[in-house]
Image (spheres, helix red, strand yellow):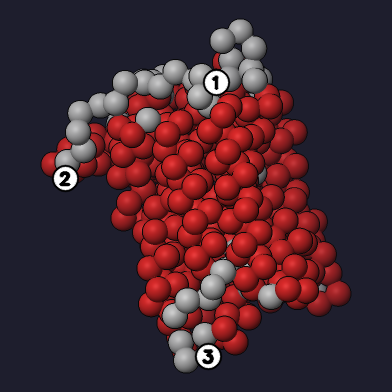
Amino acid sequence: MQKTPWGLVLALWGAGLGAAAQYGKFSVIFDQLPAAYPQAGAAIGFIVSVVGILGIFLGVAAGLLVARVRYRRAVVWALWAGAAISAFQASLPPLPWMLLSRVLEGLSHLAIVVAVPTLIAQICVPKDRGLALTLWGTFFGVAFAVLAWGGLPLVAWRGIPALLLAHGGYMAAFAVVLGACLKGLPDDAPAQPFSLAALMRDHVAIYRSPFIAAPAVGWLFYTFCFVSILTVLPGYLAADVRGLVMGAMPLVSIASSMTLGVVLMRYMSAIAVVLVGFAGSALAMSWLGVAAGLPAACLTLAATMGLIQGASFAAVPQLNKTARAQAQANGAMAQTGNIGNTLGTPVMALAVGGMGYAGVPILAGVAFALGACAHLALAKKRQ
C-alpha cells in the first residue's frame, strides 16, 4: 500500500469511539441509575465495572482470539453485537439481565479495542503509523467528552433509553460502513484452533517477550495514575477553577498527544517518547507536591501524560512487525489497562486516607518513575 487511506483510518477510529462509549455510557449517567434500579443498592456499581473486570481476565485471550477469527471479521461482528446489546439495554431489563448484557458487551468491547489498532497499523504506510495510532489513543477521551456534552442533554430530554438506542444506532451504522470498507482488505490466515493450553502458553510467551509486553507494561502504570488522579485531584483544587481545570485536563492530554507527541516521534522512537512522558509526569507530580492544586501544574501533568498515551499505541507496531504479534500486544494492553483502571483509584484513596494530600504526588510520582524504569529494563533486554 503506497498511501495511507485516511478515510478508513477515521472510520476505524469512529468505531473505537463506539467501543469507548460501551464503557462510558453508564459512567456518565451513574448518578441516574438508582432511579432506574431502585432495589439494586450497592450492586448498581457492577453495571459500570463488570466491563472492566472482564478485561482483566480476558484481555490477552481477546488478542489471541481476534488473531484467529481475523481482524476485519472480528470488528464487524463486535459492532453488530454491540448494536444489538445496546438496543436490548434500552428496555432497561431487570438487573440480572442488564448485568449479563454488560458481560457480553465487555466481549464486544475487547474485540474492537484489540482488532482496530491492529488494522490501523496494517493499513498505514510506516511514516503515518505514529500519527494514526496517536489518533487512536484519543478514543476514550473524545468519547467521554461527547457523552458528557451530547449524551447527558439527550438523557435529560428523552431519558436513559434514548442514549442507549442512540449508541446502538451508532454501532450499527459503523458495522455497515466498515463491513463494506474492509471487505477488500486481505486478512492473515487464521492460526491454529484456540484452546486453553494454547492460551496459557501464549500468556507466558507474551509477558516474557520484551517486544510484545513492553507497551502493556508501561500502560499498566499510566492507567493506574490517569483515572485515579482525575478522581482524587479535584478535591484539592480551588472551587472556582475546579470544573475548568478538570474539564481541560483530558483535552490538553489529547492535544499534547496529537501535536508534540507526533512531532517527537518523527525524531525518536515511540518508546523514547513514552520515557519522556513518564519523566515529565514524575516532575509534574513533584511540582504538584510543593504547589497543591496549582492549575498550571495540573495542565502540565496532563500534557506530559498525553505523550505516554499516544506513543504507547504507536510503540506496538514499532516493536512488533506481524499482525499476530500486534494483536497480542494490543490484547495485553487491554488487560493491563483494565488492571490499572481497577486498582488505581482505590489504592490512591488509601494513600490519601493515610497521608492526606501528600499521598497523591508521592504515589503517582513513584508509579510514573516505576513505569520509566520498567521500560528501560525491557529496552535493555531487547538489546
Q: Residue at x 56, y 69 (%)?
A: 90
Dot placed on the residue nearer the N-terminal end, 3 or 2: 3
Q: Secondary structure at mark 3?
A: loop
Q: Residue at x 44, y 80 (%)?
A: 94
- Which amino acid does the dot numbered 3 rest on? Pro
Q: Which mark is residue 150?
A: none
292 vs 132, nearest the viewer: 132
**Mark in the foreground, 3 or 2:** 3
Q: Position of residue 50 (x, y in %)?
A: 41, 66
Q: Residue at x 73, y 73 (%)?
A: 158
Q: Residue at x 47, y 38 (%)?
A: 75
**Mark in the foreground, 1 or 3:** 3
Determine whether 321 is above or below 211 in the image: above
227 on left or right of 217: right
Q: Which mark is residue 123?
A: 1
Q: Look at mark 3 in the image and give the residue it sits on.
A: 38
Q: Which mark is residue 196?
A: 2
149 vs 160, nearest the viewer: 160
Total tally of numbered discs in the picture: 3
Answer few, some or many: residues within 10 Å of disc 3's Cα (few below 14, many 20 plus, some between 14 and 19): few
